[in-house]
Amino acid sequence: MATLIKNANIYTSNKAMPKADCIVYENKHILFVGNEKDADFSKFNIEKAYDIGGRTLLPGIIDSHIHPGWVAKSMWHIRLPWTNDVNELLAFVKKFGEEHPKEEYPFLFFEYYPTSMFDANGPTKELLDAAISDRPVLMQDFGEHLCWVNTKMLELLGVDKNTPDPGPLETFVRDAEGNPTGWIRESAWLKFADNMWNALGWRPPEDLTPETLKGFFDFLAGSGITAMADGFIENDDQIRSIYEMDNAGKLHCYYDGMVRFWSYEDLPEKIAKLKEYQKLYTSEHIKINTLKLFLDGTNESGNSASLHEHINDPGNFGEIMMETEELTKCLLLCNREGLDLHIHIVGDRAFRVACDAVEAAQAQAKASGEPWVCQPVFAHCEIVDPADMPRPARLGIFINWSCHWSGGYFGEQAMSYYTEEKWRRMYRFNEMIESGAHVAFSSDVVTGYELHRAYPFFGMQVAATRIDPEFPLDPEKYPNSMRPDESARLSLPTLLNGYTMESARQMHWENIMGSLEEGKLANMIIIDKDLFKVPVNEIKNIRTEVVICDGKIIRGSL
């Protein structure tokens, strides 16, 4: 028995029929999309018909890069007041420690302090010791790639001047004698966390279960997100729990998972893990077919791979996990295994190395008669040299951008390492799109603190205006707090397409979702305002009133 929705303002994301006013679906699939005056409804066995009074109906939104595991594991963290005054920050930490003894909180994890609060040398453990020294304390920076710890934490981790750094990106900042200063890049401390947990006789409440993941997936359902790509699977418990949710009929979302690797050396092991996941957890709603690599760090941390030396440290071009030759080997191995590769890329040198590797790998595969099936996805691509802008279209590389970063979210921290001219060239994607590249949109949300920013209409507003409503740039320096320049703003048609059809293409689901057309899944949402008529500075206030996934209403009512 079919359902008809009519008197609707439908944006289909289907270029062949971009607009319609009615849709018919039965069970999970769409039977008809078009205009009521042209429809012959007699050929459909329509049981229910709903007139929605001209409200706007869109395809289900796809978040093609987000982190459910990290979000669920962060829920116990302590939120810091937002301030650039280090004394105010330390006063809050000291007071919290006094009110919550170590018997209650054996380990204190605070988030966030502004990355811009400190210069390139970072904060020190002694500064944090002045607030709390009787137990380990971690202060996470706003960009999630730097943290600040006290002396007690370094002692319990077992990290000192003789401890080697885990890798080129994961490092302990050190003084002239090699002693850790208390500032840590990326997640270097996690490699030693078991030492601390064992010493404390305590572990953080970070179990990933259907219950702890429920809040994350409830948020997706309420936000109109009917499909997602997981930035990487945190552990076996996470993917097992998502599979259990699906079996129980509680996963109202299509899930595409990734497995993280670090180098060509550990890639075969991670491919084996991915194939184990495929065997155990593949379902109608779940697939795992992608490897994930962090090629460099972040601009705000100074460990992205740059074509230009840092302005404050001549000779320093940032960090990169591997050069072209090794990355080419990784791509070729993924291609032979029929797997995709999703790469975290921030700096312009990392972007160039990755493009060179894709080009070399495709050439080598062609020379040996191997078909090219690996889909390279470059996530973030915050700064790209103008000469490299046309390369994604030519090489078939997908770009994935986190729209809510488009304004002032990370502010001017990158100017610690880049000239203002280079900073102003960041976050540009229109040139790539105009050259024919596929650009998909996502949130890359990693913590409960920012989960609300994964709301797709929040991301659309920031990308359309280049203004962050929560963390605006100084309006005296940047008119209207707009991140320069205006030409980098993304259009609403581009944004809707990137959150629907382009994200579906990135995940190889373009034949079943991403647009509203006959034969595709009945994944759709109804919103309270017309996305294309509401003022751009009010897009974030659009409410998702009805969410339909697999033809079932999972939020709201018709």
Image (cartoon, rainbow, N blue to C red):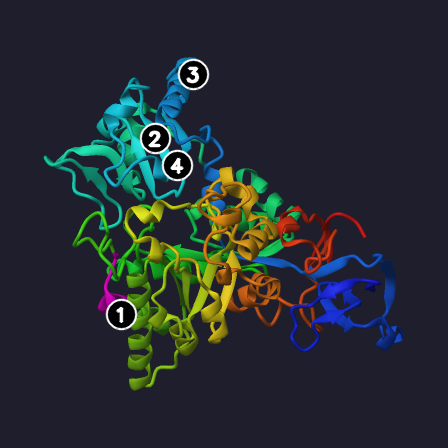
Q: CA distance from mark 4 to mark 2?
A: 14 Å
Confirm whether the magenta stretch covers residue 323. Answer: yes
- Mark number displayed over residue 138: 2
The magenta stretch is 320-330
Residue 507 x %, y %: 51, 65
Q: Are marks 4 and 2 in contact (CB under 8 Å)?
A: no
Q: Residues within 10 Å of mark 2 (few under 14, many from 20)?
A: some
Q: Quadrant of the N terminus?
A: bottom right
Residue 93: tell me if it is visible.
Answer: yes
Image height of 114 relative to 342, above or below: above
Confirm whether the magenta stretch covers residue 439. Answer: no
Residue 546 x %, y %: 73, 51
Task: Kindly state the secondary structure of the residue where label 4 is placed.
Answer: loop
Q: CA distance from mark 4 to mark 3?
A: 24 Å
Type of amino acid under label 1: Lys
Of circles 4 and 3, the one toward us is 4
Of circles 2 and 1, the one toward us is 2
Q: Nearer the viewer, residue 278 or 205?
A: 205
Q: Which residue is mark 1?
A: 329
- Mark number displayed over residue 485: none
Residue 173 x %, y %: 21, 39
- Mark number displayed over residue 114: 4
